[in-house]
Amino acid sequence: MPADPELISPRSPRVAAARRLARRNFRGKERLFLAEGPQAVREAAAHRVDRAATLVELFATVEAAERYADIVGDARVAGARVHLADEEVIADISTTVTPQGLVGICRFLDTPFEEILAARPKLVAVLAHVRDPGNAGTVLRCADAAGAEAVVLTDASVDLYNPKAVRASVGSLFHLPVAVGVPVEAAVQGLKDAGVRILAADGAGEDDLDDELDKGTMGGPTAWVFGNEAWGLPEETRALADAVVRVPIHGKAESLNLATAAAVCLYASARAQRASGGCRSVTDS
C-alpha cells in the first residue's frame, strides 16, 4: 500500500485544525466535521456532494492503514489527503475513549429543505427539539434502515455534525438527504404542501399506532415528527400534525425511548407503504 513516508507531527497545524472540529462553532465556520472509525470513513470516501468528494482528509495510524488498506485506498481515490499518525495524534483528534485508528475530515453534506420537498418524499423523519446527539444519530440510522427518503432536523434540535451524532448514525448520515435548521412550522407546512401526511409521535397521543395500521390510513406519503427525549412534543407542535399517534404499550414497560419509538413508527409506515395499495410497490428496494 502506498503510504506517506513520515508520521505527521502532533504539533502540525493540520492536527490542531482537526482537533478544533470537535467544537460546533469551528465546524460551522469551516463547514467541516469529523468522521471516526472504518465504517464512517468508508462511507465518507464513497460519498459525493455536487460531484465533490465529501472526505477531504484522513488521519490513520500505521496499523489501521495496513488493516484497512482498502479504505485508505478509497480515500486516496476520492482525492483525500492521507496522513499517517501515531496513536497519540489519533487520540488527540478523536472524541472516543477507544479510537479505531481512522479519523476523517468531511465536508458538510446537509441538503436544502427545498430540494427534499422537490423530490416528493414518501417517508420522512422530522426531529423537533431533539437535543441528545446519540439519539439524533440513532434515529437517522433507523430512518435509513426503514427506507425513509429524508430526515429533517429543526432549528431547535442538536447539531447534525456533533461527533456523537455522526458515530451513532453508523454511516447512515452518508446515505440519505438531511436538512438542518428548519423551523418546525416551516418543516410541517412544507411537507403538507408536498402532499405528505404529518404524524406526531407522542406517548399521550389520541390515536393508537395499531389502530392506524388496522384502518389502512398509513399507506400514503408520511412524515413522523419526533420530540424531545424528556418532555416529548410541545402542544403547539402537536397541533400542527394531522394526527398525534402513540405506540401502544402491551406489557408493563413505562415507555419507550426515542430511538426505539422512532424505529417502530418508521417501520410501521414502511410496511404499510409497501403493502397492496400503498404508495410504494412491494418490489421497491
Image (cartoon, rainbow, N blue to C red):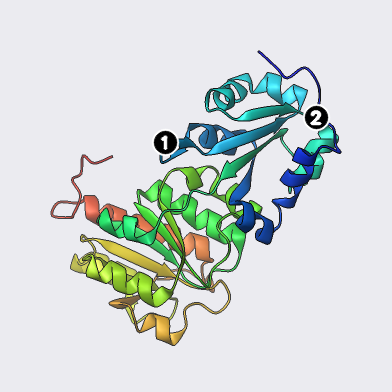
* 30 displayed left or right of 278: right
From the top left corner, tell me how far across and down residue 38 is, in percent: 62, 33
Please state which amino acid type lies under the numbered disc 2. Ile
* 211 displayed left or right of 20: left
Q: Does any portion of residue 98 appear in the rendered image?
A: no
Q: Which residue is mark 2?
A: 8
Q: Which mark is residue 176?
A: none
178 vs 232: above or below: above
- Mark 1 element type: loop
- Closer to us: 171 or 27: 27
Q: Which residue does the image show at 43% across and 86% down from the upper left?
A: 235
Mark 1 and mark 2 lie on one chain; the one further toward the N terminus is: 2
Specify the farthest residue to the left: 277
Q: Does any portion of residue 135 appear in the rendered image?
A: yes
Specify few, some or many for label 2: CA neighbours under 10 Å numbering under 14, 14-19, or 20 or more.
some
From the top left corner, tell me how far across and down residue 116 is, in percent: 33, 56
From the top left corner, tell me how far across and down residue 224 is, in percent: 36, 66
Q: Which residue is mark 1?
A: 51
Q: Which residue does the image show at 52% across and 28% down from the upper left?
A: 78
Specify the farthest residue to the bottom: 235
Q: Which residue does the image show at 54% across and 68% down from the upper left?
A: 157
Please state which amino acid type lies under the numbered disc 1. Arg
